[in-house]
């Protein structure tokens, strides 16, 4: 029998073995509660490492098997399937509209350039009716100099004096002249 600290005291060993499995390692005479139990030893590190390695190996084996199964099915489907109809072969590879913008900043720059050209250049709006477009600055100068032309009022238009305040206007007796 090897000489160790515990084997030198057989009474200690007997008491230790007589204790419940959850009570081993506790000091003799320590308070005991029947609902409290302890682990006898820690978890084995080699078991955890082996389980992790086994799990990784298993996952990689499954990945490789699934890759080969999908490759087999892809080749099998290509071999067994009838050829595609002619319309499908002629169809372009571009997706149907609306498509995502490839470069939104360049598109916005182009849009602003087009709008600026419409606002700041002369051009034809309708050549047959001889209608032209003029730059916005020139149009504002002309409106300021000439004024807005009068338009013909509809024949059935009835106007009332604002101070009259009729039921039709919604200000019956509530309208007062503006203070000066």
Image: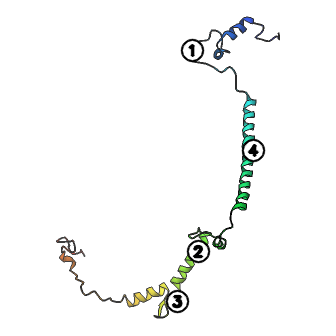
Task: Tell me which label, 2 or 1, sits earlier in the chain.
Answer: 1
Tell us which disc is closer to us: 4 or 3.
4
State the scheme by which the image is colored.
Answer: rainbow
Classify mark 3: residues with Cα within 10 Å, few (<14), some (14-19) or many (20+). some
Where does label 2 land, which residue?
A: 109
Q: Name the secondary structure under disc 1.
A: loop
Spatial distance from mark 4 to mark 2, Cα to Cα?
Answer: 53 Å
- Asked where in the image residue 55 lies, by quadrant, the reply is top right
Label 2 element class: helix
* Image disc number at residue 123: 3
Look at mark 4 in the image and give the residue it sits on.
61
Q: Position of residue 44 (x, y in %)?
A: 73, 27
The part of the image, by quadrant, that contains residue 62 is top right
Which of pointers 4 and 1 indicates the residue nearer the eye?
4
Place of residue 137 in the rendered image (x, y in percent of width and height, measured from the top left): 48, 85
Marks 3/1: CA distance? 99 Å
Query: Which of labels 4 and 2 is toward the front?
Result: 4
Question: Which label belongs to residue 34?
Answer: 1
At 41% from the left and 87% from the top, the residue drawn is: 143
For marks 4 and 1, the one nearer the N-term is 1
| Earlier sequence position, callout 3 versus callout 1 | 1
Dot 4 and dot 3 residues touching (CB under 8 Å): no
């Amino acid at each position: 029998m090897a000489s160790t600290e515990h084997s030198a005291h057989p009474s200690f060993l007997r008491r230790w073995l007589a204790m419940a499995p959850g009570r081993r390692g506790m000091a003799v005479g320590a308070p005991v509660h029947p609902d409290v139990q302890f682990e006898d030893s820690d978890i084995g590190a080699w078991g955890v490492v082996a389980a992790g390695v086994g799990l990784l190996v298993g996952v990689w084996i499954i990945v490789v098997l699934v890759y080969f199964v999908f490759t087999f099915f892809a080749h099998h489907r290509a071999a067994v399937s009838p050829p595609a109809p002619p319309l499908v072969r002629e169809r372009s590879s571009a997706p149907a509209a609306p498509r995502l913008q490839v470069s939104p900043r360049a598109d916005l720059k182009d849009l602003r350039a087009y709008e600026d050209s419409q606002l700041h250049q002369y051009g034809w709006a309708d050549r047959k009716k001889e209608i032209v477009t003029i730059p916005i600055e020139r149009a504002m100068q002309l409106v300021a100099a000439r004024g807005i032309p009068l338009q013909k009022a509809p024949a059935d238009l009835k106007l009332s004096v604002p101070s009259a305040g009729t039921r039709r206007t919604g200000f019956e007796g509530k309208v007062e002249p503006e203070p000066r």
